[in-house]
Amino acid sequence: MTMNEKGLTQEEVNQRISQGQVNDYVSDTSKSNKDIIYDNVFTLFNLLNVVIAICLALVGAYSNMFFMAIIILNVVIGVSQEIRAKNLVSQLSIVNEENVEVFRDNQKIGIPTTELVLDDVVILSAGQQVPSDMEILSGNVEVNESLLTGEADLIKKSAASQLMSGSYVTSGQCVAKVVHVGKDNYAIKIAEEAKIHKPVTSELVESIRKVAKFTSYIIIPLGMILFLEAYFLRQSDLKLSVVSSAAALLGMLPKGMVLLISIALATGVVKLTKKKVLVQDMHSIETLAHVDVLCLDKTGTITQGNMMVSEVIDVNPSLKEINTTNLMENYINATDDNNLTMQALRSYYQTSTNLNVLDTLAFSSDRKWGAVLFEGVGCVYLGAPERLVPEDKLPQEIYQAQAQGSRVLLLGIDQSATQLTDTVGNVEALSVLIIEDAIRENAEQTLAYLDSEGVALKVISGDNPITVSNVARRAGLNHYEEYIDLSTIETEEEVKAIVDDYTVFGRVSPQQKKWLVEALRQKDHIVAMTGDGVNDILAMKEADCSIAMAEGDNATRQMANLVLLNSDFTTLPDVLFEGRRVVNNVTKVASIFFIKTIYSFILSIICMVAAIGFPFIPIQITLLDLAIEGYPTFFLSFESDKRKITTKFLPTALRRALPNALLVVINMLVIYFVSPKLGITGIDQTTLMYYMLIAVSAMAVIKACLPFNPLRLFLAVTTTVGTFVAAMLFTSLLEITWLNATTLPVFVVLVICSIIGKLILDKLITGKMGSFN
């Protein structure tokens, strides 16, 4: 250990802490409680509702402001659910907390990266993210700076080289000194890009934004026109003019949809945490529900990732005087490699130091081999057989092992080598090392299920394609025999041209993994990518949904939308089910919310053109918000629904809402023109209109509950009966009366006609009758 590598003393550490030279500036990528409250309170929907409430308050229409209770409840539930989900994620995010080894007081200790101080001497190994800007004191590493530069090429770093925070060590080991901490680190500037996957596109959220944007364009001018007509043309008093206009505008605001989506997703997060799945982006649950291509790594995903050496075969009788075991023991001692394969070798072999090491070259996923130069022995190579010796010189034992799905490494030697380079010399094979990795329990059932659900499976691995294909065969993957060696393909265009032709891709470089995912997305696929190594980062970042194994590298965990805490991909169907539950349930009940939006818009236009008053008042709309929209949809959103998603959310929801919305408009027009001829006027006419509005809205709830089960039947009955009872109990508040001998028969006839009309409209508009499906 050199003087520079002895590290700081505790006194020096304390001095730097007192001066604020600590790496404790944490870029918290989750929203703060303040941000959560802000995002839930200051929304366009809330603003429009508050403006309407202020107008009602100014004219003293306080009873019609009850709708604000729903807005406040929405905010309270939304905030509490999101904070609860955030806290659960924070508790589970311990898996993402990284420690680092440093020298202090001449001793090697482990500390959190946030406790690093300026001039700390740090030990970095393969798989670690560089936690602070550093300068290498000793050692050699290869670094992936793709998150900084966008380039996937591995960069060699040695003594005096600079390590940028936010990059990743892919191979080797080094000792480095911290040169920047906290806000001075380059990593702070790229924290969002380096640790967070690109924003997930949510169809549900985008749909709500479209509705909000459309509503914001029309609600203000339409409200002003309705008010001016009421106040000046119909000469209504100020209070009545405001109340009538406010009701029309409130009806167009689907207040509960955003809340419903948030609650459904937050519930999914909570349920998945119980299944050992850490959701780092709530909307990724929805994204995974739409996935139609899943890219799987082999090692640690299909297999258990617990490598073990099953057999070592010496294959070169002409070099039998070379003690291959001693070579491996010295090789293991000399190299800093510590990936899963090397860990298996370290468990199998002892270490030895009887050979003098002149130079080392760490294993890299691009090169597929590593090497150590020994004095008086030559250069010893360890890696992929086909990368070390010509194909015609490969031992038959390699093919036999690969045919069984085993991983194979070749130990070779170039006795004439005097220095290490990036290219192999005249390598002679010494030993074949056969390494086994057991298939995960339930892997076959999981792959079969995903395939049956229409999810195309692609196995992408850095291993030999024959080996990967046989592992896929053992796991029961369909089309396992369709494999290709991507080391024979160089250009992005070639990779993209063959992406649909194969199921198994072997000898894939990190850049090629990214190309494969890009190609699939360009073909309009929704792609999920699993990974556990640094070489998966580029592809995971490109995927629509990235899934990391908790036992993998820190880098992959930080990049992922989802982290499988038990590192078991067989839990993916659970995530798929949660996503489908959210999307299917929200789509199913969304039509109930949009009925009011559609009929309020149409009736407002009719009232504006005809210069007549809107038929309802805000308090009446509020009752429907609570009883028709809020109550049944809340419980329906929690139901299990594993069906494959085959429709688009917004067009489907609007199409399903349209028949009921049209029925409301038709009934209002019929009552408006026919009831005076039957002697029904004034409050009786308003009552009849409101009861028909309840009836038609209840039909939508009943349809959403089909086919009935005990819960749905209960919701359909209690919603329908409860809303009518509430209307009769609060007649004075709602400014209506009871149905009487004159209005009751008309109501019954209109309900029967509406049922028939609904069946006809459903058939014409949705193409289906008697079922929500």
Image (cartoon, rainbow, N blue to C red):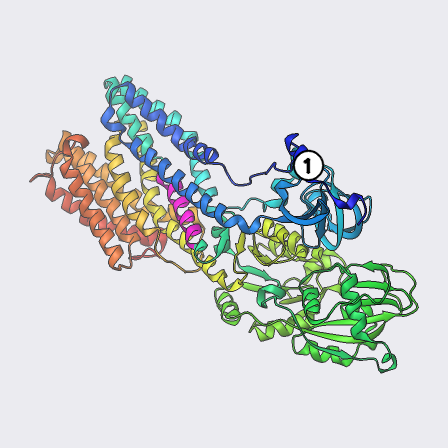
- Answer left or right for 211 relative to 476: left
- Answer left or right for 415 relative to 228: right
Which of 280 and 23 lies nearest the eye of the viewer? Answer: 23
Residue identified by numbered label 1: 11
Q: Please state, as top left, top right, bottom left or bottom right, where the C terminus lies in the image.
A: bottom left
Residue 578 falls in which quadrant of the image? bottom left
Q: Secondary structure at mark 1?
A: helix
- How packed mark 1 is, by other alpha carbons closer than 10 Å (few <14, some 14-19, many 20 or more), is few
* Residue interval drawn in magenta: 255-271
Q: Is residue 261 magenta?
A: yes
Percent of width and height locating residue 208: 43, 40
User: What residue is rendered at 32% in x and 42% in y?
Assistant: 595
- Answer left or right for 608 relative to 680: right
Residue 405 falls in which quadrant of the image? bottom right
Vertical comparison of 281 with 577: above or below: above
Percent of width and height locating residue 249: 33, 30
Answer yes or no: is residue 707 visible: yes
Vertical comparison of 541 with 532: above or below: above
**Amino acid type, label 1:** Glu
Which of 534 and 160 lies nearest the eye of the viewer? Answer: 160
Q: Is residue 704 magenta?
A: no
